[in-house]
Amino acid sequence: MVREKRLPYLLMLPSLIILILLVIFPMVFLYYNTLFRWGLGAWDKREFVGLYNYISVLTDPFFYNALGVTSVSYTHLR
């Protein structure tokens, strides 16, 4: 009886491992890296800046211009 209850979980395990390795881990790693300032090739010279990267994007007028252009382009393509 216990073996029959474990079988579905064992069958899902390879898919879950692949999902974690190919989707979830890179996504968490990406958001973790957004909290640092660093250049390409300078991995060891990272500086923790917290939410400064997000604040600088949200206060940049070029971002809103690009967002508007993208929105217009998207609506015209639909």
Image (cartoon, rainbow, N blue to C red):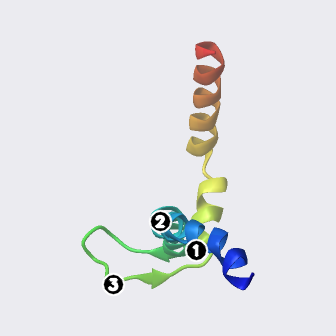
Residue at (75, 81) in percent of width and height? 1
Q: Position of residue 69 (x, y in %)?
A: 58, 27
In the picture, the disc for residue 74 is none
- Dot 2 and dot 3 residues touching (CB under 8 Å): no
Callout 3: few (<14), some (14-19), or many (20+) C-alpha neighbours within 10 Å?
few
- In the rendered structure, the answer to whether residue 27 lies left or right of residue 54 reads left
Asked whether residue 59 appears in the rendered view, the answer is no
Label 1 sits on residue? 10
Q: Name the residue: 49% across, 68% down.
A: 14
User: Do the residues under discs 2 and 1 have CB atoms within 8 angstroms?
Assistant: no
The answer to which of 13 and 36 lies nearer the viewer is 13
Q: Is residue 65 above or below residue 9?
A: above
Residue at screen point 66% across, 81% down? 3
Secondary structure beneath label 2: helix
Identify the mark nearer the N-term, 1 or 3: 1
Q: Is residue 48 above or below residue 24?
A: below
Q: Position of residue 18 (x, y in %)?
A: 47, 65
Q: Secondary structure at mark 1?
A: helix
Q: Nearer the viewer, residue 42 or 29?
A: 29
Residue annotated with mark 3: 45
Mark whose residue sits in front, 2 or 1? 1
Between 35 and 66, which is closer to the camera in this rendering? 35
